[in-house]
Image: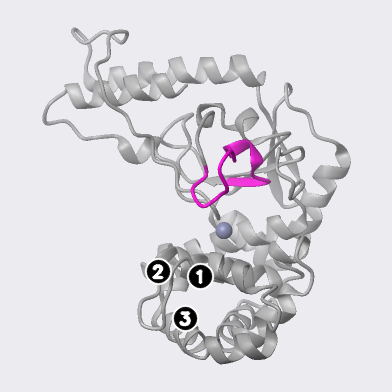
């Protein structure tokens, strides 16, 4: 599949003065991964003469879609509760797993329902990431320990799907990831939909909620007090490494975009019933409330305004 991506990129590059369709083939970042296919070379397979650029792009997507279906079996959609699920016959999941994902959505109440609707969100479920996103085979999630692959992730999100430029946002949840951190649970659902709550603001006010002045200021204040609060609330250094991963290199006056959005998603999940980290690091949610009080209060206010609390 990576080979086909390469070919596609070559096709795009070989045609001068034409738009580059890069946006349509790049997956947007997930909690732990930003995937951008790096592609170079020359395309020999797709006819280069006699067809227009658009026809060539269409041909490419037909070809790649056929290949994906060969791997997955024909995916089918089912509306269950508030969400549309996508199932893959060659990568079945148990009813219990679906139930757990649904419970995660349920904990978000009306807010969750609105987010799913506005973001036209679909929930893909499979045993592991490459069953759902076969083109990601061999991709390494940055920030994970060596040897980790995309199949170690319990969840993965994409805004632009390889099946075509018009496809909706898809979040994949996996029942049998290779990770020791076990399968996706309701915590992961809350975290991932938290990202969509954040993204939704881009459509409303032109930027993510996590990038608004108020949010940046709140997190900045908390980070300023962090050395003291860590001494007080994390004497044994149990939680600090995970917090560091969440903040993604943010400092008091230089907050990173991923740090802001990850912190938002995790606190959003916490306030709705439990963060993703809490699933395997008990006590993290209480800790975060102590060390990031301004940020927690700010998101709590947002939930109050959206009718959740
Ligand atoms: Zn995340």
245 relative to 135, above or below:
below
User: Residue 28, percent across and down?
Assistant: 45, 47
The extreme front residue here reads 236
| In-image side of 90 versus 67 (left or right) | right
Q: Earlier in the sequence, mark 3 or mark 1?
A: 3
The residue shown at (45%, 48%) is: 34
The residue shown at (36%, 67%) is: 206
Residues rendered magenta in the picture: 141-156
Q: Nearer the viewer, mark 2 or mark 3?
A: 2
Q: Nearer the viewer, mark 3 or mark 1?
A: 1
Asked whether 238 or 158 is in front, the reply is: 238
Q: Marks 1 and 2: in contact by CB < 8 Å?
A: yes
| Prevailing SS of the magenta stretch | loop
The extreme right residue here reads 96
- Disc 3 marks which residue? 215
**148 magenta-colored:** yes
Picture disc at residue 256: 2
């Amino acid at each position: 599949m990576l080979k086909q991506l390469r070919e596609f990129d070559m096709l795009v590059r070989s045609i001068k003065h034409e738009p580059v369709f890069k946006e349509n083939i790049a997956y947007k970042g997930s909690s732990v991964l930003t995937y951008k296919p790096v592609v170079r070379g020359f395309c020999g397979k797709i006819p280069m003469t006699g067809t227009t650029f658009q026809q060539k792009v269409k041909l490419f997507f037909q070809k790649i879609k056929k290949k994906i279906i060969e791997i997955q079996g024909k995916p089918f959609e089912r509306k269950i509760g508030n969400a549309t699920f996508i199932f893959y016959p060659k990568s079945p999941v148990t009813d219990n797993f679906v139930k757990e994902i649904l419970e995660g959505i349920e904990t978000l109440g009306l807010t969750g329902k609105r987010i799913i609707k506005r973001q036209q969100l679909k929930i893909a479920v499979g045993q592991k990431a490459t069953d759902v996103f076969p083109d990601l085979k061999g991709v390494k999630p940055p920030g994970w320990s060596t040897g980790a692959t995309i199949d170690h992730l319990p969840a993965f999100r994409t805004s632009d799907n390889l099946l075509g430029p018009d496809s909706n946002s898809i979040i994949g949840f996996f029942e049998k990831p290779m990770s020791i951190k076990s399968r996706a649970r309701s915590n992961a659902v809350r975290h991932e939909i938290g990202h969509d709550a954040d993204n939704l603001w881009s459509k409303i006010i032109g930027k993510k909620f996590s990038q608004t002045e108020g949010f940046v200021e709140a997190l900045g204040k908390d980070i300023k007090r962090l050395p003291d609060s860590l001494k007080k609330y994390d004497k044994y250094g149990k939680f600090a490494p995970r917090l560091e991963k969440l903040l993604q290199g943010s400092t008091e006056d230089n907050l990173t975009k991923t740090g802001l959005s990850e912190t938002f998603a995790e606190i959003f999940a916490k306030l709705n019933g439990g963060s993703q980290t809490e699933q395997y690091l008990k006590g993290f949610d209480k800790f975060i409330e102590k060390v990031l009080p301004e940020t927690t209060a700010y998101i709590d206010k947002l939930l109050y305004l959206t009718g959740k609390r």
